[in-house]
Image (cartoon, rainbow, N blue to C red):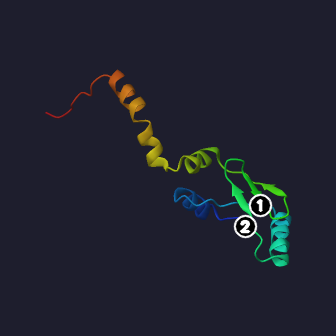
Amino acid sequence: IAGSFADIFRSNALKNGLLPVEVERDQLDHIGRLVDADPDAELAVDLEAQQVRLADGSTISFALDPFARGMLLAGTDELGYLLGLEPQIAAYEARRPARISTLP
């Protein structure tokens, strides 16, 4: 959870199954105050609801690219997503005319 992430870090994190949660500065300060008051305070990140639940009962919403969210929720990556489309890809290829060889 941070106020911002570099684009390359965000992209790499998501591709590796790590959720970078970006929140506004005042929200980050609120989290810091809660932790200062109680170092054992727990928070929960709910990817499905796109919310961070804080120890005081409040929630912070966060934005996330829908495709990246879907990959994280499915527990897969882009390659896994494409492999899941294998039947549709095979059907598409079957409808296409055979390739013509240009070799002598």
Residue located at (36% from left, 30% from top)? 90
Q: Nearer the viewer, residue 7 or 34?
A: 34
Give the side of residue 42 with respect to residue 13, left or right. right
Q: Residues within 10 Å of mark 2 (few under 14, many from 20)?
A: few
Distance of mark 2 from mark 1, alpha carbons?
Answer: 6 Å
Q: Where 91 sits versus 4, above or below?
A: above
For numbered disc 2, what is the local secondary structure?
A: loop
Q: Where 27 sits versus 65, above or below?
A: below
Q: Point out which mark residue 2 bears.
A: 2
Q: Nearer the viewer, residue 35 or 4?
A: 35
Residue located at (58% from left, 62% from top)? 8
In percent of width and height, residue 49 lies at 72, 47
Give the side of residue 95 with respect to residue 61, left or right. left
Amino acid beneath label 2: Ala
Residue located at (31% from left, 22% from top)? 97
In percent of width and height, residue 58 lies at 85, 58
Q: Point out which mark residue 23 bears.
A: 1
Quarter of the image for the C terminus: give it.
top left
In percent of width and height, residue 39 lies at 77, 77
Residue located at (82% from left, 66% from top)? 25
Amino acid beneath label 1: Val
For numbered disc 1, what is the local secondary structure?
A: loop
